[in-house]
Amino acid sequence: PELIDQFGTVSQECAEAMATAARAKAQTDYALSFTGVAGPDALEGQPSGTVWIALATVSGVTSHQYHFTRDRAYVRHSAVMAGLDLLRRALLAE
């Protein structure tokens, strides 16, 4: 709750905390998290299409901000594809 109060749900801090917690809870080597605004309206001052994706690994956590355009379905699909690409790249790097 403190993280959300301080940074909001659509934030780098929230995405990284979710990925880290998911990895710990599932006891996995990798965990992805997504937080954003699929639309059609803005949320917490963030425009529709803003998405934070975090990837937690044994080496730490990284996150990226994206800005997708078009409708809600496109934003959601694009976010999933971007998250899977982050995971793919991490796996290839090992």
Image: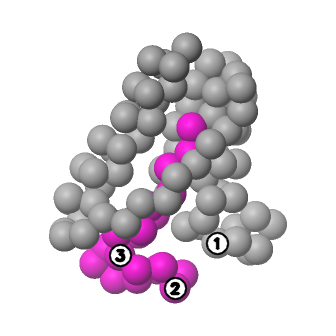
64 or 76: nearer the viewer: 64
Can residue 62 be found in the magenta stretch?
no
Q: Residue at x 57, y 38 (%)?
A: 55
Residue labelled with disc 1: 8
Quarter-of-image position of residue 70: bottom left
Q: Amino acid at mark 1?
A: Gly
Quarter-of-image position of residue 66: bottom left
Residues at circles 2 and 3 in contact by the CB criterion of under 8 Å: no
Residues at circles 1 and 2 in contact by the CB criterion of under 8 Å: yes
Quarter-of-image position of residue 73: bottom left
Q: Residues within 10 Å of mark 3 (few under 14, many from 20)?
A: many
| Disc 1 to disc 3, C-alpha distance | 15 Å
Q: Amino acid at mark 2?
A: Gly
Image-based side of 7 in relation to 88, left or right: right
Residue 25 in sight here: no
Residues at circles 1 and 3 in contact by the CB criterion of under 8 Å: no
Residue labelled with disc 2: 45
Q: Residue at x 64, y 27 (%)?
A: 57
Residue labelled with disc 3: 48
Query: Against 44, is 24 above or below?
Result: above
Magenta stretch in the rendered image = 36-55
Helix, strand or loop for disc 2: loop
Dominant secondary structure of the residues highlighted in magenta in the image: loop
Find residue 12 and report its horizontal and vertical position in percent: 62, 59
- Choose the circle earlier in sequence order: 1 or 2: 1
